[in-house]
Amino acid sequence: MLELENIHFTIQKGKEDIHLLEKVDLRVPTGHFMAIVGPSGCGKSTLLKLIAGLNQESEGSIHWNGRNLSEEGDLECSEIGYVPQFSIAYEELTVEENIESTVRLRAKTENRKEFEDLVDGILNSTGLDALRDRPVKVLSGGQKRRLSLALELSTDPVLLLCDEVTSGLDPKSEQDIVALMHELSRNEHRIVVNVTHSLANLDLYDSVLVLDAGRVVYHGPPRALEHYFSVSKAEDVYPQLSKRDKNAWADSWSKHRDAYYENLPAKNTGDPNVSVSAVTPSAAAQFFALFFRRWKIFFRDWGGLMLQASILLGFPFLVIVFELGGVEQTMRLADAAPGTKAAMEAEQEAITFNLNLGGVVSGLVMFQVILLTLMGSNNSSREIAGERQIFEKEKLGGVRPLVYLSSKLAFLSVLVIIQSLWMAIFVQSICKLPLESFLPHIIMLLLVNGAMTSICLGISSMAKTADQASLLSIYLVGFQLPLSGAVLALPDWAGWLTRPFISAYWSWAGSMDGMEKNYLRWIKEVTDTWLGPMWLCMLVLLAHVAIGLFIAYVGVKRPRWEH
């Protein structure tokens, strides 16, 4: 039995209190299929989110089989299924792969046979067996809604909440989905609640809850709906509501409620404390499920794969082309050095050559660094924001935020290592940068790529949309070159103010500090920018990585549901 007692939900808009729900009282027996209907903006989805535990009621209490959820905590993740309005499946995967992924994340199975039986059972019970090998991106709207319902059955939830799952469907598809939800509600331990704006197919529901401006104005059998509102057909209920004040309708309902509740079908559920919930898999099991799923999606996304390949192969060539005229200079030293007994002309030529060489080396390294920051931005700016809605749904289903973030970090680390090593080795093999040791330079490139990847991952976790995350990340990369001081010298006060936040500067400065001493002398001659010691540069870049990951963790912990 689900019971709501005197539920209020109030939000603040400026200094004004907005009452989205007021004095909501109702009870729903188990083995029951209920529709929540009402005009747009009446509080249907808000009420569903309160029951799901996504929002916290301002007043009142919610009970499940006598247990006060408002005081004793929400239902377990495995006990509740929530189907939002948006798609919760990955377009690149097949129907079966999406269901398998959800089972791995939400239900612990003892062996492979039990796992396969569970997946097959879900496919068969939702009529998706014939579509199991079909990619989600080619499914119709009704088939996608059917899949959304299927994904929630991995734990056999006792409470299945559906938010506008029939919205936008043609009449036949809508009828099929409502019929499927009705069938799923026949489980004697389960309640199925469907929020809908449509008043079609009401005969399949056990009860209909009508909301008007946040108040309950009817909750009873669908067959009594027309009689109660004095209309000839259900579609006339909404116009009828506008003829009276919401409080008048609510007061009228409070007088007649008990009589209508007597006509609601009741189920004998046996022991109310029976639990049919599944066991949530371990953190390690969830990590590997998320990690391997991400790689599968990566290789299925041909557009993204081609972009990654183009960046990986093209960016090192850009570095060389950019400094093509100076590459030959990096392969030889000046034969004459300033201060020798050579003729004045030779001395001046050597000075000019070495100054030019210092600029070429500085430019080559800075171009490497800037392009790696761009790679880092491309790696992660959309990584969380692009699948935020699916992640929120999976988090509600029991996926641990830290495990989710760890899987992203593991996936992105592979990209960072491949990109940085390829950039370093390719450029070095052609340009022969005068490094005292090649390893520190590789480390600086790994760190700048990792720092920008981490920071943009943090941006992605905090952004409202994927496009917003991409735009902010591109702006961040755009500021790297002018504020690094490697190309344009900044005033001292501006340099010290901005330098701590510019990853490109620290990677460039650390690499410069690792140059052969005679080269470093001329590099310092052609730049007015302070060059920090390599150890300090590494520490700052590690701090950038840590800050980015901390922001990302805060971002994934924060709920970000669409309201």
Image (spheres, rainbow, N blue to C red):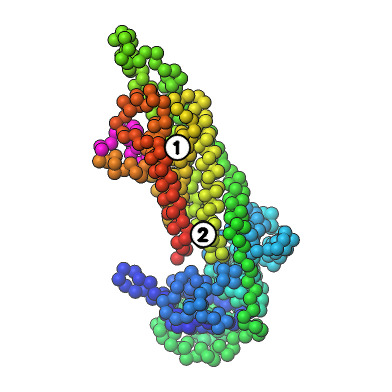
Amino acid type for the residue under numbered disc 2: Pro
Question: At 52% across and 35% down in the image, what residue appears?
Answer: 421
Q: Position of residue 144 (x, y in %)?
A: 60, 60
In the rendered image, is residue 397 in sight?
yes
Q: Secondary structure at mark 2?
A: helix
Question: At 74% across and 61% down in the image, what residue appears?
Answer: 113
In the image: residue 449, left or right of residue 64: left
Residue linked to disc 2 = 401
Q: Quadrant of residue 207?
A: bottom right
Q: Secondary structure at mark 1?
A: helix
In the image: residue 10, left or right of residue 119: left
Q: Quadrant of residue 241?
A: bottom left
Dot 2, how many residues are within 10 Å of its Cα: few (below 14), some (14-19), or many (20+)? some
Q: Which quarter of the image is occupied by the C terminus?
A: bottom left
Determine if the magenta segment contains residue 148.
no
Q: Position of residue 50 (x, y in %)?
A: 48, 73
Determine if the magenta segment contains residue 481.
yes
Is 271 situated above or below 388?
below
Question: At 60% across and 57% down in the image, what residue appears?
Answer: 284
| Nearer to the camera, 91 or 142 | 91
What span is colored magenta in the figure?
479-492
Mark drawn on residue 16: none
Q: Position of residue 228 (x, y in %)?
A: 52, 86
Q: Position of residue 379 (x, y in %)?
A: 50, 45
Residue linked to disc 1 = 444
Q: Find out whether the residues at labels 1 and 2 contact each other: C-beta distance under 8 Å.
A: no
Q: CA distance from mark 1 to mark 2?
A: 30 Å
Question: At 25% across and 41% down in the image, what residue appears?
Answer: 493
